[in-house]
Image: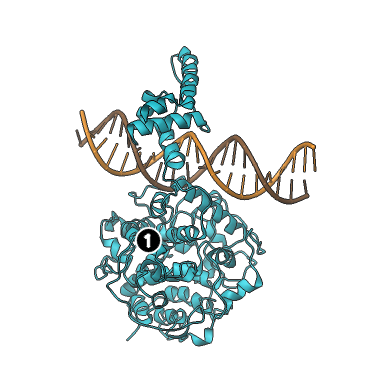
Chain colours: A cyan, B orange, C brown
Amino acid sequence: MIARSVRDPRVVTARLQLMKLMMVGMVGGMIPLKKGPWTSAEDAILIDYVKKHGEGNWNAVQKHSGLFRCGKSCRLRWANHLRPDLKKGAFTPEEENCIVELHAMMGNKWARMAAELPGRTDNEIKNYWNTRIKRLQRASLPIYPPDVCLRLYKTIQDGQIMGTLQTGDTYDPELMQTDHFKIPEVEFKNLELSRGVPSYSLGLFDTSASSMLKQGVGSFYGNGLVFPTMHPAKRPRESQTIFTGLDGIVGRGLPVFDQLTDYPCGKIIEHSGLSSPCDPDLSTYDQPSWDVLPGSHAILNDNSSSASAPICVAKKLELPSLQYSESHQDSWGTPASPLPSLESVDTLIQSPPTKEMWSDGQSSRSSGLLDAVLYESRNLKNSKKCSGHPTSDVSVAFGEIHGSPLNPSETEWEVHADLKSPSGHSTSSLFSECTPVSGSSLDGRAYNVRPEPVDQVLIPYAEARKAPNQTDCNKPDVLLGTAWFTPSNNCQKDQFFQTDDVAADLGGDQP
DNA sequence: AAGGCCCTCAACCGCACAGCA
DNA sequence: ATGCTGTGCGGTTGAGGGCCT
């Protein structure tokens, strides 16, 4: 093997070329490291080296192989292109679904996402995601399909994610409580880690959730941003704890759910007596006259490059490359319509921005939907605890769900307002508005609310997705739901909310 | 046909962490 | 405890190709 590789003409030629380079470079006493695209000869050398010495110790590659590349470059080349187990070619729809969901839960944890997608590299995923973001942003569409929002929230309600926060995370409660931002620490103690959390989530959610909590959730919520992020250049590593100003912004809304109202096809209802869900006090801001759908505070297709400069995103709904049709729109607005593909879901959701979205230089790319949902869940509990009564902010936020096409058959959804909040929406009532108790599911199937089994099987994410005959993984609402994590269960069952659980979690308005 | 624009993707850069001396 | 080295991660950049005008 080794002898053959040494005789490989490509390797020999490359080494000769490198020796020439060395001779030239050594004139000045320094051998400049090569940059730029790799040649096939260099690849051959690197492959040869790895075959002999294995992966790792990349800085030694230069010494031992004569390759004039820095160790990092070698590692990257190997990991992203030369590794034998790499899967080439475009992402499959399933993989794309995976990425969306993973990003919703992890944020920009490309390496972790790559770990869940065998044969794919973090770079690949990152590029894919950024491309996707761009495309959606052009179309003024939100990043995550509404299914993701709701499924994640449900997952949290089930304790599948929140429980991880108490294990191994690095957030510092003291730091967490700075800047008027108080995070209750007791909420997660009763949650079970074994309730169907996918293998990856156990190790991932903690970081995602905590990083969310560390990375400017306040600005996220306060300014209508959907995802807590920081300016890319300023963003700390995970271990760092940074809060942007949170004054007066916590609990103003849950843009994740705001998104649910923002389908061009959806029935946008009046926020009876409500102002902006993200900003109950409109006088606080100099609200621009966005030419958007009423009540639109969708998940922002943010762009890190635009973080520092407010951008007036297209006021018209520009169709992305993957354009949607009327029928697709109907699929969101009409329960009986088949669920759209994830791709079409992406293009279906409009996300007109608000001025505040960019005002603090945050990027929605940087953290996952889960972060937002987790935060909101905690925040809701906290606000309930601290104030002794539900805050109008929360109510307003969830009130946005009211008219969501996710709740296409509005008449079938329980809508009831209580008097516990100025807006007439308690947290529980608001969630019951988006939580079917009985009636039609999103895809028109009948459903019942049932308790979920606790003894769900933990399986690797990738395997879970492959599980045949148990989960229709091509259905976004299934893919993005709890059923996705627990293919041993009936997906139909798992995609349902447990109204009581949700309501209870949101503040215990239920008797 | 030519130029400009946009998109994709490979690669680089800076930072942070872990392990070790 | 401190500094160094290796490695990994995430953000950004730039080359190349395709599309449009």
| Residue A266 seen in this snapshot | no
> Which quadrant: the C terminus of chain A?
bottom left
| Residue A90 against residue A264 in the figure, above or below | above
Please, which residue is most extreme toward the top here? A27
Q: Nearer the viewer, residue A144 or A90?
A: A90
> Which quadrant: the N terminus of chain A?
top left
Label 1 amino acid? Glu
x 46%, y 73%: residue: A397
x 45%, y 25%: residue: A68
Chain ID at mark 1: A
| Residue A189 seen in this snapshot | yes
Q: Quadrant of residue A351?
A: bottom right
How far across and down, in percent of the image, does residue A129 sit?
51, 53
How far across and down, in percent of the image, does residue A402 sit?
50, 79
How far across and down, in percent of the image, does residue A271 sit?
54, 78
Apparent side of residue B16 relative to residue A365 in the rendered image (left or right): left
Q: Secondary structure at mark 1?
A: helix
Q: How many marks?
A: 1
Apparent side of residue A340 relative to residue A118 in the rendered image (left or right): right
Q: Nearer the viewer, residue C2 or A101?
A: A101
x 54%, y 53%: residue: A303
Q: Nearer the viewer, residue A249 or A163?
A: A163
What residue is pinned by disc 1? Answer: A463
How far across and down, in percent of the image, does residue A162 sit?
32, 66
Disc 1 packing (10 Å; few <14; some 14–19; many ≥20): few
Q: Quadrant of residue A388?
A: bottom left
| Residue B20 against residue A285 in the figure, above or below | above
